[in-house]
Image: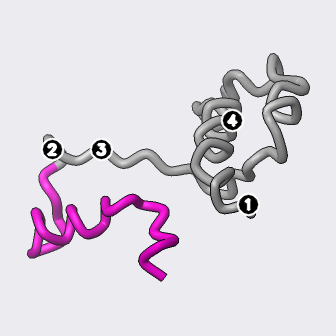
Amino acid sequence: LAALDQTRGLLTYINDKFPSGFPLDPGVVTCVIGKGTRAPESVSALLEGWTERVWDTELSRSPLLEELVALSSYSGLRL
């Protein structure tokens, strides 16, 4: 299971550096997370309609950026 660690050791690092857990000092912690982000099937699928996904004003985030990160993160798992 460790071979599929998609955090690339980040959770281990956080557990080692912050053994007491929550609450963490907000001055040293940044969390970037998307809920329900799907990885596109390909770069061409990512680019389809990209202008509509640059920024979602209602959610105050970039679906395009989230999909780009998801594509690069999960493409290696598609074997």
The mark nearer the N terminus, 1 or 2, is 2
Q: Which mark is residue 28?
A: 2
| Circle 3 SS class | loop
Of badges 3 and 1, the one in the foreground is 1
Residue 69 position, x and y percent, is 59, 40
Q: Which residue is rendered at x = 21% and y = 62% of the image?
A: 13
Please tell me whether residue 36 is drawn above or below residue 52 in the rendered image. Answer: below
Left or right? Give the position of 57 relative to 9: right
Magenta-span inclusion, residue 73: no
The mark nearer the N terminus, 3 or 1, is 3
Q: Are marks 1 and 2 in contact (CB under 8 Å)?
A: no
For mark 1, what is the residue?
78
Please tell me whether residue 62 is drawn above or below residue 41 in the rendered image. Answer: above
The mark nearer the N terminus, 4 or 1, is 4
Q: Which residue is rendered at x = 14% and y = 41% of the image?
A: 27
Q: Amino acid at mark 3?
A: Thr
Q: Amino acid at mark 1?
A: Arg
Q: CA distance from mark 4 to mark 3?
A: 19 Å
The mark nearer the N terminus, 2 or 4, is 2
For mark 4, what is the residue?
63
Q: CA distance from mark 1 to mark 2?
A: 34 Å
Range of residues picked out in magenta? 1-25
For mark 3, what is the residue?
30
Of badges 4 and 1, the one in the foreground is 1
